[in-house]
Amino acid sequence: MPIINLMTAKGRGGLESMALRYHQALEAAGHQVISIGHPDGVLAGLPSFHPLTTGFSHDPVAALKLRHLMRHYRASRLFAHGNRAISLATHGFAGAARQTVAVVHNFRFKPDLSKVDQALCVSDAVRGAVQQAFPALKARVVENFMPLVRQPVKSPPAAVPVIAALGRLHVNKGFDRLLEAMALLRDEGISATLRIAGDGPERAALTAQAAHLGLGPERVIFSGWVDPVDPFLAQADVFVLPSRVEPFGLVVAEAMAAGVPVIASHIDGPQAILGAGQFGLMVPPEDPTALAVALKTVFADWPKALGRAQQAQARALETYDQPAGQARLSALMQEIGA
């Protein structure tokens, strides 16, 4: 029977991208999937897509429309991505699916999560938070995945090393601390160029901070939003994720697949992906000095860093590539009797 894949946000960030990956993986596993979401969202390009606009989280009109679509397609299960989709799927007017599964991407879940049949959490940390909030809810870990692009593992840079960072320019991503680390390297006479790809509410503040620190374009370049990310990562000698909060951090796996040495904050998502430091260097969040030291460590011993990058690449492709995600979802569907 058909499966409804519901994601109502208009954006094109990590949550929205994973809703698209779920559709593709479930379909590749032989399931009929109907994606429902915002008419201008990331799911809209799918052949089996139905637009649905919600005015707010508990929109009764949208809930009635969802009920109609569930009946029309005779769907047996519904995957809901994000708080608004979960609220809509569990609304009294929507009519419960035979099984409603919430995909929980972060720690910002809402009380409506308690109404679903089970939750799929992107990490052990997110699952722990869900189980603490809703002890009766069945929660399991299903790590994120995406089509990863394998590139040759880097060679030691012949010139000034290029440091890459990528993500939404938001305070949670810690790019301000990375800029401070760049200033520390400069003060020690160490040459390096940082390229930050992404956009968001902190762009003006970060640009101003770089100017205040005296980090000109030879030190820091703001590349804007890049899509696809593969050419950007191909130009990097080392990748840094300086986040304060990161429930998962799939960009770390993308960098690993690209054969780039990785440095990341020692927090929930990156810790799991990097095997608690086995596949990349980890530093405390909010610590630009530790971040500068980690960068100097890489610069001082490229063979060691690149050897670790080779191991990391194998782990990323084995664990976080699209086929691995498809296998996880296939196993899940067998467990729940689909």
Image (cartoon, helix red, strand yellow):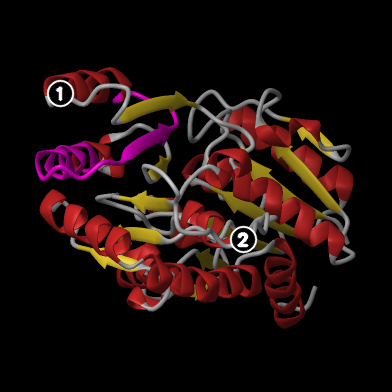
Closer to the camera, 104 or 85? Answer: 104
Q: Is residue 335 left or right of residue 217?
A: right
Badge 1 crowding class, 10 Å Cα cut-off, few under 14, some 14 to 19, many 20 or more, is few
Residue drawn at the location 57% of the way across and 67% of the way down? 117
Closer to the camera, 331 or 170? Answer: 170
Region in magenta: 178-202
Whole-percent x, y for residue 249 in the image? 44, 55
Contact flag, marks 2 and 1 (Cβ < 8 Å) = no
| Residue sitting at the far bottom | 335
Q: Marks 2 and 1: which is nearer the front?
A: 1
Q: Quadrant of the C terminus?
A: bottom right
Q: Judging from the image, what secondary structure is the residue with disc 2 in?
A: loop
Q: Earlier in the sequence, mark 2 or mark 1?
A: 2
Residue 145 is labelled as: 2
Against 278, residue 216 (above or below) is above
As for residue 196 lying within the magenta part, the answer is: yes
Against 105, residue 209 (above or below) is above
- Name the residue beneath numbered marker 1: 214
Closer to the camera, 64 or 276? Answer: 276
